[in-house]
Image: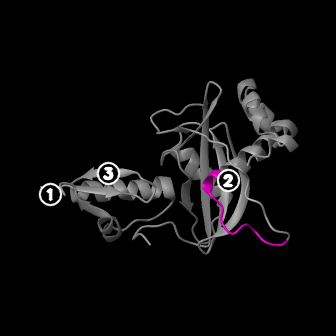
Amino acid sequence: MLPLDVEGPVTIEVFTIARIGDVLMLTGPCGPAPWLIETGDGENPLDTAVRIIKGALRESLLVHSTSWRFERGAVVLTFLAVVPEIGAMDAAPVERSALARNAEHAAPDDISYGQVLEHALRHLAWLAEDDGVVQSALDAEWLALLGGYVPEPFRQLN
Amino acid sequence: MKAYLLTCMCGWEARGTEDEVVGAAQSHGRDIHNMDVTHDQAMAMAKPADS
């Protein structure tokens, strides 16, 4: 383990996404990668996530939790943060991934961050069709972009 | 004055004197990862910048 690492029973993982035209980009203060945030004893993870995200990003359109998993001895809570601009942060296009599939009563043995992000974007795409808050936070270009993540039988990626 | 390169677990880097990289790491830890970083923790991640 590195001498400095995110610790504690709950880890916040943020995927910061932006769009350049019709290309979805992964970005963030740590570049195009999962952004890990520690939670202290007694801290509400949602409050911590919003506080750190608001402090680190100039502006966000939306912050939403999308999944959880148990990894490296901690519960990892995943959030999407949608930002209107990438600014000086490093960024890379988001690539599509196949979802990690559960067994009947067990989580997948191994989940890549690309699979977690794919799930998060499908979650947001569903909300974009169902949730008025999400619909009002995102413009028409965002909603059209997320349309490509709406689950459909033929959109299973292998 | 000796220069150091400090790399965070997330890939973020700071370069400078011991005081500069420790200060930068403490700010980065607090603001980005919600972590309190000690001087010793920061220096454990630092390497001489010239090597």
The residue that disc 3 covers is B14
Image quadrant where residue A133 sits: top right
For the residue labelled by badge 2, is the local secondary structure a helix, a strand or a loop?
helix
Query: Quick one: label 3, few (<14), some, or many (20+) residues within 10 Å?
Result: some
Across and down, in percent, residue A21 comes to: 62, 24
Q: Residue at x 48, y 49 (%)?
A: A30
Query: Quick one: label 2, few (<14), some, or many (20+) residues within 10 Å?
Result: some
Looking at the rendering, the stretch of residues picked out in magenta corresponds to: A105-116
In the picture, the quarter occupied by the N terminus of chain B is bottom left
The residue that disc 2 covers is A115
Q: Residue at x 47, y 53 (%)?
A: B31
Q: Is residue A39 above or below residue A22?
A: below
For the residue labelled by badge 1, is the local secondary structure a helix, a strand or a loop?
loop
The residue that disc 1 covers is B2
Q: Mark 3 to mark 1: distance in Å?
A: 14 Å
Mark 2 touches mark 3? (CB < 8 Å): no
Q: Is residue A155 above or below residue A6?
A: above
Q: Residue at x 40, y 54 (%)?
A: B27
Image quadrant where residue B38 sits: bottom left
Q: Nearer the viewer, residue A33 or B16?
A: A33
Q: Extreme bottom residue here?
A: A73
For the residue labelled by badge 3, is the local secondary structure a helix, a strand or a loop?
strand
Across and down, in percent, residue A85 comes to: 56, 31
Q: Earlier in the sequence, mark 3 or mark 1?
A: 1
